[in-house]
Amino acid sequence: MPSARSRAQLSFYLAWTAAESQDVGQAYAALIEKTRQVAGTAMKAAWEANPISSDAEMSIPRTVVDLAPLNQAEDAYMRAVIRHLAALAPWWAR
């Protein structure tokens, strides 16, 4: 479970992005939620797996933790940020 400090930091960034832009805030919140789903599934699988027995097993292969499900949410967040920043830029900066 994340520490109180890391939960507070995450709450800060969720609030900050939402205050900056509703679209950016929603996209960021969706990315965080998807990350929690992927991480939660990976952590459950890790607890149920046999313990490792060598240092070489410390690296987690993509076959064990697949981050590909985050791609769509990450892309949506980046597009929201780009749209928001483009709207803030003066006409001569475009």
Image (cartoon, rainbow, N blue to C red):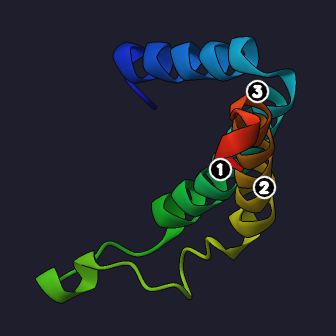
Q: Mark 3 points at which residue?
A: 25
Q: What x and y, as percent, mark residue 2?
A: 43, 29
Distance from the alpha carbon under mark 1 to that under mark 2: 9 Å
Circle 1 crowding by C-alpha within 10 Å: few under 14, some 14–19, many from 20: some
On the image, which quarter does residue 72 sit in? bottom right
The residue closer to the viewer here, 45 or 12, is 12
Question: Does the CB distance between marks 1 and 2 fall below 8 Å?
Answer: yes
Q: Is 50 placed above or below 34 here? A: below
Q: Is 16 placed above or below 80 here? A: above
Mark 1 residue element: helix
Distance from the alpha carbon under mark 2 to that under mark 3: 12 Å
Q: Mark 1 points at which residue?
A: 35
- Residue 48 left/right relative to 87: left
What's the residue at 57%, 16% (across, down)? 11
Circle 3 crowding by C-alpha within 10 Å: few under 14, some 14–19, many from 20: many
Mark 2 residue element: helix
Q: Which numbered tag is attached to residue 22?
A: none
> Looking at this rendering, what residue extends furthest in the left direction?
55
